[in-house]
Image: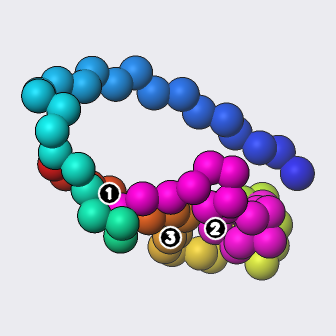
Amino acid sequence: MIRYPECAHLTVTGTGTAVPSSTYLAAIPGVYKMSDPEVNIDIYSNANQNVQTYTIPGPAVWSG
């Protein structure tokens, strides 16, 4: 299986007083398991050749 790590450059701005609700929080490690279909996906397998949608693993994105 091929895994694709990824990085991001973020710029955090503001006062730092906003806090998301627990719905948006995730514990690392613990939020992901290799048995999760969204994490352990082989995009080259025959079973996934016709997959049209992909659910991003993890909690919802908070826009605060």
The mark total stands at 3
The residue pinned by badge 1 equals: 61
Task: Please give the name of the residue rendered at 27% of the width and 21% of the height, measured from the top-left corner.
Answer: 11
Can the viewer see residue 60 in this picture? no
Task: Residue at 26% x, 56% y: name it.
Answer: 20
Callout 2: few (<14), some (14-19), or many (20+) C-alpha neighbours within 10 Å?
A: some
Q: Which residue is mark 3?
A: 55
Q: Do the CB atoms of the residues marked 2 and 3 lie less than 8 Å apart?
A: yes
Reply above or below: 6 against 30. above
Q: Give the structural element (helix, strand or loop) at label 3.
A: loop
Main SS of the magenta part reads loop
Q: Give me the C-alpha separation between circle 2 and circle 3.
A: 6 Å
Kindly identify the residue that appears in the image at 88 percent across and 51 percent down: 1
The residue that disc 2 covers is: 38
Q: Compared with residue 36, is residue 25 higher up or lower down, i.e. above or below?
A: above
Q: Position of residue 18 (x, y in %)?
A: 16, 45
From which residue to which does the magenta span run?
A: 24-42
The residue under label 3 is which amino acid type?
Thr
Callout 1 amino acid: Val
